[in-house]
Image (spheres, grey):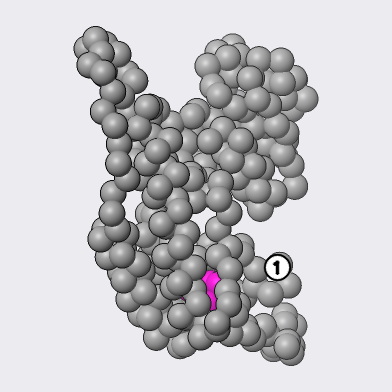
Amino acid sequence: MARARKDGLKLVYWKVEEKEKIVRAVALALHMGTATNKLQALKMAQEELPVNRRRRIGAMSEVPWFEEMYAKAIALVKKAQEQIDAAPKPEIVEPEPAPVEAQEQGLGEELRPVLVTWLAGIFREALTLAVREIAGAEQSTISMSPSKVTSVINSAIGTAKKPSVLIAGLKGAQKQVITAEFGHLVDLRFYESDKSKDQLRSMAEHCDAGIAFTDFLSHSHSDIMEARCKNYVAAGGGMTTLKDTIRNVISKLH
């Protein structure tokens, strides 16, 4: 439901399920550190909604229902964390002793798939229970995909080197937004178009994936990246499209 405001824009009234989706996204953003405060997290969380269902919010007082729902969500998250902590740990057979060099480089990699699979299963089950309790419904589904859960667990374990992603064509404030949302998942590297092309060639050859933000990049820059990046993708059409592209790249790298 929407009606006109004095400034000609439409007022959007969120449904209960939309509010629940936003609260979950805010809680996750604050927990993962991709947002520093509730207002910032609330603005980011609206990307979960269609464009015509988003609102301009300048202060938390404009969403008086938020705090009560957020408090319930946090209580459920803590409960879920307690369930995770109390869950029996998987049995891991210790490998034969290896040379020091191999132990330093490979032990974390051997255990990582086991831990990721185990933790991802528990994490999804706990969050699903939390969503059901918030919604007051007998059936509910968790919106986080298995690949995203795996990325979150990979980040939490932190035993392996993050895959590197080169993004070319962003400016200062844009880089901060992308770093805040994806910096915990991958090693982000940025190239600005006013830098030398030799620098771009070197960076493109030493990254796991490259994304050209074509809104602010010339064809010659894109051609360099396409020729030298292991996994190259071009993205244009604004920050929302760029974020979707980054998510797809990350899911393939993990």
Give the residue type at disc 1.
Pro
Whether residue 176 can be seen here? no
SS type, badge 1 = loop
**In the displayed structure, does residue 15 sit left or right of residue 97?**
right
**Residue 92, horizontal then vertical, whole percent:** 30, 36
**Residue at position x 35%, y 32% from top?**
111
Residue found at the far right of this picture: 219
In the image, residue 36 sits, relative to residue 236, either above or below, namely below
Number of numbered discs visible in the structure rendering: 1
Magenta stretch bounds: 20-24
Question: Per the image, is 21 magenta?
Answer: yes
Q: Nearer the viewer, residue 112 or 171?
A: 112
Q: Quadrant of the N terminus?
A: bottom right
Question: Per the image, is 228 magenta?
Answer: no
| Secondary structure predominantly adopted by residues drawn in magenta | helix
Q: Residues within 10 Å of mark 1 (few under 14, many from 20)?
A: few
In the image, residue 26 sits, relative to residue 250, either above or below, namely below
**Residue at position x 51%, y 86% from top?**
136
> Residue 140, located in which quarter of the rendered image?
bottom right
**Residue 220, horizontal then vertical, whole percent:** 75, 20
**Residue 210, horizontal then vertical, whole percent:** 62, 27
Q: Which residue is mark 1?
A: 50
**In the displayed structure, does residue 94 sit left or right of residue 200?**
left
**Residue at position x 59%, y 27% from top?**
209
**In the displayed structure, does residue 211 sit left or right of residue 152?**
right
**Residue at position x 67%, y 83% from top?**
12
**Residue 181, horizontal then vertical, whole percent:** 49, 50
In the image, residue 210 sits, relative to residue 17, either above or below, namely above
